[in-house]
Each structure stands twice: as structure tokens, then as C-alpha cells.
Image (cartoon, grey):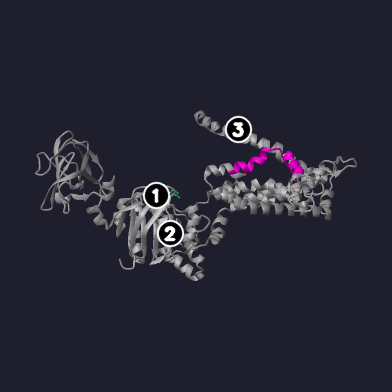
């Protein structure tokens, strides 16, 4: 009998060894903090900004307050706009890269990723320096006579949006690139062969086949841009408030942890909803790129 | 040819410095089954792709029903293609795949349904219309690809090694089915393969290609029995080929001197001193223990090669050339190491002229 049980144990061990650390990690660093956030969101705020352990749904009724509601709406709009623009810019971009020879494509992907190897604070600060009233961009515009007086770029919604787009673009391009790259050229030729003009081929063949990549791109740009606060903080100068900034402020300077937690829960719910839709639409294999 | 459906006149194709198709002239009759046959890289696919419009000819004229089409986009040409890798649309069902061309042409829904179902019946895929290509076998995918092209009732169907990915048995079966379909629908087929047996069984005419040129274009029988060039003789079937010089020509019978010895072949139009080739199929080659008049080819039996339906005997000639003859059963009259005289009936061998190209080389 022992000869039969021995291999079984051997087979199980690696599985436990593999799953064990991951589960422990997930429970310790994802599940417990998340439950704790939910727990805090139902507590009350003390006078000195501390958490008082009394059940309350006050934070949630606060969220329904029009001001918060507006910020959330604005954040959703900005994240949505960022996503749409990332898709519109990213898709042709991904398409062009995917149609290049492999080695060229690899180089282009590297170029796309380079900004992410630099510190984001440094990157955003340099943006401020570039775009400030007396910065090189304005100097150029004024000196060449394109504009009469410097444009105030910084601390505007537009600059924040541009910042978000540049920040998110690679996450949109990569998953779309990997599905477009798998699209065989002969399929497009077959479509043309059967009488479809290039536009019809794009709508009926290219788009549907690359849809999983587009969906990944939506998830990968929408969720982070919904929660991001570095870009809005720096380029928006604290004037442009998104939900990410508010959450950060609640946990930071304002010290209203239950409210911050309630807002976080809201973000998590929105995120989970999107991921749920995602898994419904796309197969797990397409998650590779994630 | 009266009103050829497809005409190629002096068509050339260059990829950079790579001259892939060289001055191709081709006329294909309506309803004909023409096969382009040749070794890998000789330009078969490129020729098809130029007719389909996926590749632009560097120069030359391509006509469909007498009308020039070089400037037309693929989707404007009334030819359809069956791709080597099928190229089925993975996100569509079998029905949607087959219906694609008709939907694009905005054929009424009812008619689409009828024609698609009729087509699926013809390729024996009834009941599969709701499946996705992923859930089909290679042979089934193949038939979907053929149905998807044929449902549009094209004048011409281009097929690029459509059976290449199938196993031998399925391939033979599909060869017969395809040929039947082609006859029944009366569609012109231009068929690419590098399987000579496939070409010989299916085609009305075969164009043997080499290095972007057509070496010979004729019926399978003509190609098999009267190869026009040394290349064709070597490419089709298994032939023994000798290079030599005519030393005597009398009553249509030539005596040819080669490195291995003298031999006889029937041939007109050859003059004494002319360099030429002689091809003899392995089934016609014979051996004898004593010399045969006119032949001085002596060799040593090397070994036997079992090939299922035939057993071949290899014989080494003194110049290092190896010749083979085939019999339905192993030749019991000889054994390895034995000296034999090689001969044949002169009318069974083919005398082949040197081509201009060879003369240049
Ligand atoms: N898009 C291309 N760019 C450059 N060279 C090409 C291209 N397509 C084909 N070639 C070259 O043209 C030559 C002929 O190719 P082609 O595909 O027509 O051969 P083929 O006869 O179909 O061969 P096979 O039997 O292997 O399919 C080859 O040398 C190939 O490398
Ligand atoms: Mg080919």
C-alpha cells in the first residue's frame, strides 16, 4: 500500500508548494486589507480624525452628497475619456507595430515602455517645467509667433487628461498589439477575396477578432485611471480633484478614514463589476498580457 | 485558344532583386482544370496571388474574360481563392463563414440561406453549420474553405495546395471529390500543388514550373510520356536520365554516347554530334546477363529497394551514375554484386533536346 500512497504525496506536494505561497500572499496582502477597508467604511470618524469603532453608514450617505457624486461622475468621465482616447490612439498604433517585422516591433515596444523605466514623479515634474508659463513650450510658441502670450497649460483639466493618456497609452497598446499580431494576414486577404472592401474587412474581421485585446485595453486603462492620483495631483496642482485624490486626502491630510474607505469600496465595486464583465467576454488566455 | 477565361502575357514579378516569376505566358480555357506544379519556391503561389490581386505584377498583362484586371483590387476581381491554411474566420460559424461573400454582396437573406445550405450539402457538411472552425477537423475545415469560395459561383477558383495539410487517405478522397465538384459546376480551377501524383490524376493540363518559368504545359499523359525538358523528365515519375551526344542517326533511331556507354533511343530531328538527354522510366529499364545490340551500358547490381507496390533494383554504372528499374516483385534473377548489361526498347526511351537555357549555362 505504501508504494501507492508515496507517489500521491509526491504529486500533491508541488501543488501545495505552488498554491500555498500564492494563497497566503493573497489572503495576507489582498483579502485582509480589503475586508479591513470595508470594515472601516462602516465605522465612524472621531473628532480628532481617528476611527471610532461604532457602526455607522454615515460615510455612504456622504458619498451620495451631490459634491462627492459630482467628483465621482467627473472621475468616471475623465477615466472614460482617457480610455476612449487611448483606444483611438492606441489601436492604430498597435496595428502599425503588429504589421512590422518582429525585430522592428520589439524595438518599438521598447520605445513605448521607456517612459516607465523613469520615475513617475520626475516625469511629471519635468512636464510641469516644460509646460509652465515661462517654460520651453510657451517660449517656443511665443517666439515663433504662434501665440501672443503664454498659454497657461499647467493645472488645467486638459493637461491632466493629456497626462493620463500618455500614462495609460502603453497599457492600451500592449494587449491590442498582442491580439492584432496574432491576426493572420491571410484572413484579411480571404475577406478581400470574397468581395469585402477594406472598411468592411476592418469592421467584420479585424475588429471582432481583435476584440479581446480591445477589452483588455479598456480594463487596463479605465481602472487605473479611475484611481490614479499622482497625475491629477501634480499636473492638476490640487485644483483638479478626482476620486483618487479625494480618497488620498481622506486618508491623508483630512483624516476621515471611514469616508476614504467608503469611497475605496465604491472604486473596488466598480472595478470588480468591470472585471466580471471582462471574464464574461474574454477568455482567460487573453489575460496573458495582463 | 478561343476566348480564354484567363490570360497572362509576359507577366513578371520581382521582390527586390529576387526575380520570382519570369515572363509568364498562360492561357486557360473556361471550365479547365489547370495545375501549376513545381518544386518549392518556383513561384506557384506568387503566380496565383497575382491573379487574385494580392500581389502586383512587376510588368505584364493579366486578363479575365479578355478584360485587363491589373489595376483592380482583390475585392473587385471575379475570382475566388482557397487558401493553403484555409484562413477561415474564427469568430464566425461554418454557416457565417460560407455566407460571408454573399452577405457582402447583399444577396437577399433567403437566397443566402438556400445557397449556403446547398453548398454545405455538396461538400457533405450538413449539420455542421453552427460549429466554429475551431471545432472542425482538418478535412472539414478544408471543405468549409472550398464551400466558402464556391458559393459565390466564381468564374475561376484559385486553389493553393488546398490538400497539403491532409493525410494521404483523406487527400485521395478529397482529390476525387474536388474533381467531381469542378466538373459538376463547370468552374475553371487553377490548382497549385507540388504533389505530382495529385497533378496527374486531377488536371486537364499541367504547367510544370521551374525558377519562375513554365518548362512545359501539356496534358498529364503528354507530360508523363513526352517530357519536353530534362527537368520535367526528372521531376515527373522516377526516370533514369542520361546526358550524351548523338553519334549515329538512322531510321529514327539514335545511337547516343554517354559517360557510361552507348545506348539507343528513338528520336527525330536530331543530328549527329548534337548534345542531348535520354530519359527512360524505371518500369521500362531492363537488364540482361549478356550484351544487347546497340547498348554498352554495363553495371553492378547494388541493392533492392522495397516500396510497397514495387521493388526497385539499383544498378551502379562505371561513371558513378546509379540507375533503377522497378518490378512488381523483387527481381530474383540477379543478386547484389552481379555484373549486368542495362538496356531497353528504344521506343520506350525519350530523346530530349537541350533547351536554349541549358545551352547558355
Ligand atoms: N512577399 C515576399 N517578399 C519577398 N520574397 C517573396 C515574397 N513572397 C515570395 N517570395 C519569394 O518568391 C519565391 C517564390 O515563392 P512562392 O511562394 O511563389 O513559391 P511556391 O512555388 O509557392 O513554393 P512552395 O511550394 O514552397 O509554396 C521564393 O523565393 C520566395 O522566397
Ligand atoms: Mg506556395
Tell me if residue B38 can be seen. Answer: yes
Q: Residue at x 36, y 60 (%)?
A: B9
Whole-angstrom CA distance, mark 2 to mark 1, is 19 Å
Q: Quadrant of the N terminus of chain B?
A: bottom left
Q: How many marks?
A: 3
Which element is circle 2 on? helix
Q: Nearer the viewer, residue A240 or A286?
A: A240
Q: Residue at x 65, y 46 (%)?
A: A171
Residue density around tag 2, few if under 14, some if 14–19, many if 20 or more, within 10 Å? many
Q: Are marks 1 and 3 on the same chain?
A: no
Q: Is mark 3 within 8 Å of ligand 1?
A: no
Quickly name the residue at label 1: B19
Earlier sequence position, callout 2 versus callout 1: 1
Say which mark, if any, is on residue B52: 2
Quickly name the residue at label 3: A17
Residue A111 lies in the magenta stretch: yes
Q: Position of residue B78 (x, y in %)?
A: 43, 65
Q: Is mark 2 within 8 Å of ligand 1?
A: no
Q: Nearer the viewer, residue A207 or B255?
A: B255
Q: Quadrant of the C terminus of chain B?
A: top left
Above or below: residue A86 compared with residue A103: below
- Residue mark closest to the camera, 3 vs 2: 2
The quarter holding residue B308 reads top left
Which chain hosts label 1?
B
Q: Range of the magenta residues?
A: A108-130
Q: Position of residue B283 (x, y in %)?
A: 20, 47
Amino acid at each position: 500500500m505504501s508504494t501507492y500512497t508515496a507517489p500521491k504525496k509526491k504529486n500533491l506536494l508541488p501543488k501545495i508548494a505552488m498554491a500555498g505561497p500564492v494563497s497566503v500572499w493573497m489572503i495576507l496582502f489582498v483579502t485582509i486589507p480589503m475586508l479591513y477597508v470595508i470594515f472601516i467604511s462602516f465605522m465612524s470618524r472621531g473628532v480628532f480624525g481617528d476611527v471610532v469603532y461604532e457602526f455607522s453608514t454615515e460615510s455612504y450617505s456622504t458619498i451620495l452628497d451631490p459634491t462627492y457624486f459630482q467628483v465621482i461622475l467627473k472621475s468616471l468621465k475623465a477615466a472614460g475619456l482617457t480610455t476612449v482616447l487611448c483606444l483611438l490612439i492606441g489601436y492604430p498604433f498597435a496595428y502599425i507595430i503588429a504589421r512590422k517585422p518582429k525585430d522592428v516591433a520589439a524595438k518599438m515596444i521598447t520605445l513605448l515602455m521607456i517612459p516607465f523605466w523613469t520615475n513617475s514623479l520626475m516625469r511629471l515634474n519635468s512636464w510641469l517645467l516644460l509646460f509652465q508659463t515661462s517654460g520651453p513650450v510657451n517660449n517656443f510658441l511665443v517666439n515663433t509667433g504662434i501665440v501672443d502670450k503664454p498659454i497657461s497649460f499647467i493645472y488645467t483639466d486638459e493637461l491632466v487628461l493629456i497626462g493620463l493618456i500618455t500614462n495609460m497609452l502603453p497599457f492600451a497598446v500592449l494587449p491590442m498589439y498582442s491580439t492584432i499580431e496574432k491576426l493572420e494576414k491571410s484572413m484579411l486577404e480571404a475577406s478581400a477575396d470574397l468581395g469585402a472592401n477594406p472598411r468592411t474587412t476592418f469592421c467584420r474581421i479585424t475588429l471582432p477578432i481583435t476584440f479581446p485585446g480591445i477589452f483588455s485595453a479598456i480594463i487596463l486603462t479605465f481602472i487605473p485611471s479611475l484611481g490614479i492620483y499622482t497625475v491629477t495631483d501634480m499636473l492638476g496642482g490640487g485644483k483638479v480633484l478626482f476620486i483618487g485624490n479625494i480618497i488620498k486626502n481622506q486618508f491623508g491630510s483630512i483624516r476621515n478614514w471611514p469616508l476614504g474607505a467608503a469611497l475605496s469600496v465604491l472604486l473596488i465595486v466598480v472595478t470588480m463589476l468591470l472585471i466580471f464583465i471582462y471574464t464574461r467576454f474574454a477568455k482567460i488566455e487573453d489575460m496573458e498580457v495582463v | 485558344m478561343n476566348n480564354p477565361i484567363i490570360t497572362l502575357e509576359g507577366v513578371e514579378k520581382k521582390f527586390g532583386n529576387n526575380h520570382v516569376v519570369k515572363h509568364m505566358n498562360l492561357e486557360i480555357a473556361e471550365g479547365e482544370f489547370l495545375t501549376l506544379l513545381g518544386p518549392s519556391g518556383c513561384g506557384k503561389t506568387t503566380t496565383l496571388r497575382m491573379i487574385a490581386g494580392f500581389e502586383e505584377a512587376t510588368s505584364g498583362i493579366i486578363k479575365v474574360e479578355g478584360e485587363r484586371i491589373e489595376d483592380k483590387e482583390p475585392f473587385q476581381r471575379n475570382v475566388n481563392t482557397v487558401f493553403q491554411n484555409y484562413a477561415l474566420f474564427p469568430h464566425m460559424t461554418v454557416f457565417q463563414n460560407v455566407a460571408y461573400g454573399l452577405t457582402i454582396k447583399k444577396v437577399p437573406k433567403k437566397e443566402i440561406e438556400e445557397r449556403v445550405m446547398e453548398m454545405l450539402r455538396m461538400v457533405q457538411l450538413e449539420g455542421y453549420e453552427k460549429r466554429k472552425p475551431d471545432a472542425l477537423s482538418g478535412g472539414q475545415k478544408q471543405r468549409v474553405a472550398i464551400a466558402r469560395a464556391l458559393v459565390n459561383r466564381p468564374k475561376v477558383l484559385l486553389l493553393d495546395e488546398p490538400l497539403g495539410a491532409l493525410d494521404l487517405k483523406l487527400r485521395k478522397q478529397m482529390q476525387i471529390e474536388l474533381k467531381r465538384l469542378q466538373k459538376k459546376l463547370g468552374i475553371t480551377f487553377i490548382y497549385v500543388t507540388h504533389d505530382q501524383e495529385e497533378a496527374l490524376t486531377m488536371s486537364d493540363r499541367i504547367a510544370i514550373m521551374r525558377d519562375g518559368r513554365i518548362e512545359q504545359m501539356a496534358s498529364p499523359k503528354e507530360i508523363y510520356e513526352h517530357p519536353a525538358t530534362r527537368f520535367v523528365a526528372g521531376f515527373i515519375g522516377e526516370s533514369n536520365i542520361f546526358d550524351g551526344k548523338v553519334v549515329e542517326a538512322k531510321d529514327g533511331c539514335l545511337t547516343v554516347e554517354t559517360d557510361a556507354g552507348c545506348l539507343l533511343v528513338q528520336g527525330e530531328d536530331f543530328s549527329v554530334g548534337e548534345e542531348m538527354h535520354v530519359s527512360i522510366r524505371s518500369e521500362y529499364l531492363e537488364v540482361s546477363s549478356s550484351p544487347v545490340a546497340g547498348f554498352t551500358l554495363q553495371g553492378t547490381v547494388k541493392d533492392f529497394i522495397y516500396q510497397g507496390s514495387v521493388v526497385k533494383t539499383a544498378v551502379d554504372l562505371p561513371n558513378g551514375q546509379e540507375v533503377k528499374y522497378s518490378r512488381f516483385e523483387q527481381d530474383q534473377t540477379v543478386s547484389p554484386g552481379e555484373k549486368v548489361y542495362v538496356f531497353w526498347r528504344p521506343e520506350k526511351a525519350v530523346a530530349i533536346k537541350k533547351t536554349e537555357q541549358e545551352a547558355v549555362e
